[in-house]
Amino acid sequence: MVQKKITYSEATAELESILQRLRSGELGVDELTAATTRAKALIEICRQQLTVTKQELDTIIDNTTL
């Protein structure tokens, strides 16, 4: 099964949704475990995308003469 690559905006929106559910107390123990696991994966996706973007910007800046 091929998974669609999630965008940074989608990941942060899903993280916000998980956070709201945590704050509201609507998650049971089983759901809490799954939500925490998903949140960790989403955070890693965001970190990776930010790292790639930073590297691309650094390359652009390094190759630009003022």
Image (cartoon, helix red, strand yellow):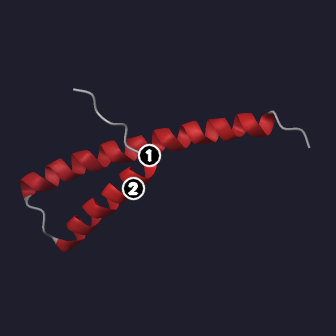
Q: In this view, does 5 lie to the left or right of 38?
A: right
Indicate the position of residue 15 as horizontal and vertical percent values.
33, 57
Q: Which residue is drawn at 26% across and 60% down?
A: 18
Q: Is residue 2 above or below residue 29?
A: above
In space, the residues marked 2 and 1 are separated at their CA atoms by: 8 Å
Quadrant where the N terminus sits is: top left
Query: SS for tag 1?
Result: helix
Q: In which quarter of the image is the C terminus?
A: top right
In this rendering, position of residue 65 left or right of residue 41:
right
The residue shown at (23%, 45%) is 37
Bin the neighbour count of mark 2 within 10 Å (Cα to Cα): few under 14, some 14-19, many 20 and up.
some
From the image, tell me which residue sits under label 2.
12
Q: Are marks 2 and 1 in contact (CB under 8 Å)?
A: yes
The numbered mark, 2 or 1, whose residue comes first in the sequence reads 2
Direction from residue 33 to residue 41 in the image, left or right: right
Q: How many marks?
A: 2
Amino acid type at image mark 2: Thr
Q: Quadrant of residue 12?
A: bottom left
Q: Which mark is residue 60?
A: none
Q: Give residue 8's position: percent from left, percent from top.
A: 44, 48
How would you rate the neighbour count of disc 1 (Cα within 10 Å): few for under 14, some for 14-19, many for 20 or more?
Answer: some
| Residue appearing at x 38%, y 47% in the figure | 43
